[in-house]
Image (cartoon, rainbow, N blue to C red):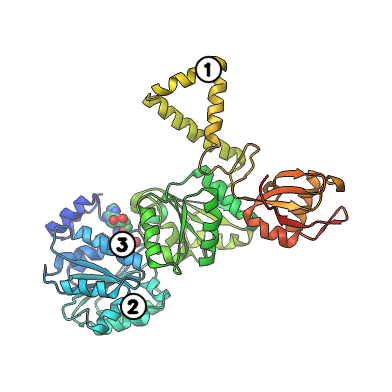
């Protein structure tokens, strides 16, 4: 079967040339179905998953059909967030590369004065958030007299964010003689009502089946975790996979902040993104992530909605979303544009029914994986080290170091020298959370316990005491030192509060144990 090519869709030469430069081989389903219809001026309701190329689906036909260099706003694209507005504007600019078309993103948080002067200089397509677009319409700084195209992108998300009234307001300000294209991943009732009210009666509905390339190209796995070990489990997963670009999802803004604060001291390259953060901060973080200067982005659903980043290798649901739609959106951040991606979900026992529902709704299987053991981490890390050493050997650019090597091999066997060097590298990495006894030291806090040899306690007594009173796992306790009158123990940072709250003050061997964070490390 022959696949439809871009040049069979009716687009003009300049747009086709730009698409060629983008190296897109074939139109995606939504593009194939929407573009010819949009070129014939029909209103369109397009339903397709995130990551299926909707921007080009509406952008290319608009760019083909608009008048060139009039300097008057002919098209308005509504997007739910600043990041999306910018992203859509950038994609449109790429498509309009060979045309004289000015495209401007406008959104809340940016100086309105800057936007006003840009609008004055002449703009053909405005991409913006509904609130700010409305501000400009009301001020008279955005004139709609020539607007012939309206796009409502990510309509369901704008609905969720409470933009429906703003959108209606914008719609009723526009000329009826316009083309409207509405795109949405889902079709809640409110959107159907909106489209009935404001779109033409011969509107074409284009729904692309759920089994989008997004889900198909993403391998989905889950880890069963218990709440107390969730963070440690995550660290182990990250250490074994060492993802280069990974988005982690949390349920709440607070959850995002907490996870960032917990991961950073362990040496992970991580930043968070959510609605309470300053616009400039969010943009900064996103840029770093896009440029590859940040490995882990932690976000809420809303903050990450629709963000398109090339080559996201992993999506991790640190918190499982409540509904299947969000799940699909989240994992749609990876495996985009026909690249393979991996999605992990951390699932507590109570969440297994949610997981089953997601599997049912998405007609996919989420495969179980076991939390990596210390041995797995050791193996993964060793493999990386061996690989990089082999690379250095292959490059053969270490003449300066040969005399140093000889000093060592004259005294020790080559195996010993190599092993000791590997060990040195092993424990010098950025994420060196595992010391010699498979013990985590970096993200840990040393606790002081007011009980010691004098009280005839042994290591196992203290471990049992903490495990029982604070309901934690003995794998999470490290480096116990029992001294005469007191003891010290390392515990992961996230368990400190639990231990102080639940264990301190309880009795062990008939003595009340007082627990505090130790003043300084040994
Ligand atoms: P959506 O709006 O559906 O979430 P986007 O328009 O943001 O999707 O596109 C997702 C990514 O896929 C972008 O990086 C875009 O450049 C790329 N893309 C768009 N169309 C194609 C295509 N036909 N082939 C390959 N990649 C494409
Ligand atoms: Mg989009």
Earlier residue among tags 3 and 1: 3
Which secondary structure, mark 1?
helix
Instruction: Give the residue number, with chain letter if any, for mark 1.
Output: 409
Q: Which residue is at a point 60% across and 55% down the rendered structure image?
A: 230
**Circle 3/circle 2 CB separation < 8 Å:** no
Do we see residue 207 in this rendering? no
Quadrant assignment for ligand 1: bottom left
Q: How crowded is mark 2: few (under 14 residues within 10 Å), some or many (20 or more)?
A: some
Q: Mark 3 points at which residue?
A: 87
Label 3 with label 1: CB-CB less than 8 Å: no
For residue 116, what is the image quadrant? bottom left
| Residue 211 locus on image (x, y percent) | 40, 58
Q: Distance between the residues labelled 3 and 1?
A: 56 Å
214 and 242: which is toward the camera = 242
Residue under label 2, please give it.
Answer: 131
Q: Earlier in the sequence, mark 2 or mark 1?
A: 2
Q: Earlier in the sequence, mark 3 or mark 2?
A: 3
Q: Is residue 297 positioned above or below 126 on the image?
A: above
Q: In this view, does 476 lie to the left or right of 121?
A: right
Along the line of sight, which residue is nearer the eye, 109 or 88? 109
Residue farthest toward the front in the current orientation of the protein: 520
Mark 2 CB lies closer than 8 A to ligand 2: no
**Residue at the (70%, 54%) spot, across then down:** 472
């Amino acid at each position: 079967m022959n696949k439809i090519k871009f040049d069979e869709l009716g687009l003009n030469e300049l747009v086709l040339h730009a698409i060629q430069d983008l190296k897109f081989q074939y139109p995606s389903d939504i593009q194939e179905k929407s573009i010819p219809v949009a070129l014939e001026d029909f209103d369109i309701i397009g339903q397709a998953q995130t990551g299926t190329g909707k921007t080009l689906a509406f952008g290319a036909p608009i760019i083909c059909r608009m008048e060139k260099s009039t300097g008057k706003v002919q098209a308005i694209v509504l997007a739910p967030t600043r990041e999306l507005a910018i992203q859509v504007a950038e994609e449109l600019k790429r498509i309009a590369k060979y045309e004289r078309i000015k495209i401007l993103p406008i959104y809340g948080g940016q100086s309105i004065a800057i936007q006003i002067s840009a609008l004055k200089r002449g703009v053909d397509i405005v991409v913006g958030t509904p609130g700010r677009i409305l501000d400009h319409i009301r001020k008279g700084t955005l004139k709609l007299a020539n607007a012939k195209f309206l796009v409502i992108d990510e309509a369901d998300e704008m609905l969720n964010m409470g933009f429906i009234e703003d959108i209606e307001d914008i719609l009723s300000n526009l000329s009826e003689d316009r083309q409207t294209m509405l795109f949405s991943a889902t079709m809640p009732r409110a959107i159907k009502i909106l489209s009935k009210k404001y779109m033409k009666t011969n509107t074409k509905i284009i729904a692309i089946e759920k089994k989008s390339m997004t889900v198909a190209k993403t391998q989905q796995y889950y880890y069963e975790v218990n709440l107390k070990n969730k963070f440690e489990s995550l660290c182990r997963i990250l250490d074994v996979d060492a993802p280069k670009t990974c988005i982690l999802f949390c349920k709440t803004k607070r959850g995002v902040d907490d996870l960032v604060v917990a991961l950073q001291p362990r040496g992970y390259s991580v930043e968070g993104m959510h609605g309470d953060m300053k616009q400039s901060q969010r943009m900064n973080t996103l840029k770093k992530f896009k440029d590859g200067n940040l490995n882990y982005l932690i976000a809420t659903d809303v903050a990450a909605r629709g963000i398109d980043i090339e080559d996201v290798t992993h999506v991790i649901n640190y918190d499982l979303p409540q509904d299947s739609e969000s799940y699909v959106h989240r994992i749609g951040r990876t495996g985009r544009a026909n690249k393979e991606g991996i999605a992990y979900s951390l699932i507590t026992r109570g969440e297994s029914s949610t997981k089953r529902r997601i599997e049912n709704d998405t007609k996919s299987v989420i495969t179980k994986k076991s939390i990596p053991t210390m041995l797995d981490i050791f193996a993964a890390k060793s493999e990386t080290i061996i690989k990089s050493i082999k690379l250095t050997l292959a490059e053969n650019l270490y003449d300066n170091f040969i005399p140093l090597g000889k000093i060592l091999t004259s005294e020790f066997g080559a195996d010993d020298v190599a092993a000791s060097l590997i060990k040195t590298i092993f424990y010098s990495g950025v994420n060196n959370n595992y010391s010699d006894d498979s013990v985590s030291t970096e993200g840990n806090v040393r606790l002081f316990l007011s009980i010691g040899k004098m009280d005839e306690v042994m290591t196992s007594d203290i471990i049992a005491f903490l495990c029982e009173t604070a309901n934690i796992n003995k794998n999470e306790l490290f480096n116990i030192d029992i001294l005469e009158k007191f003891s010290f123990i390392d515990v992961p940072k996230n368990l400190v509060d639990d231990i102080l709250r639940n264990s301190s003050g309880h009795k062990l061997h008939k003595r009340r144990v007082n627990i505090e964070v130790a003043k300084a490390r040994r």
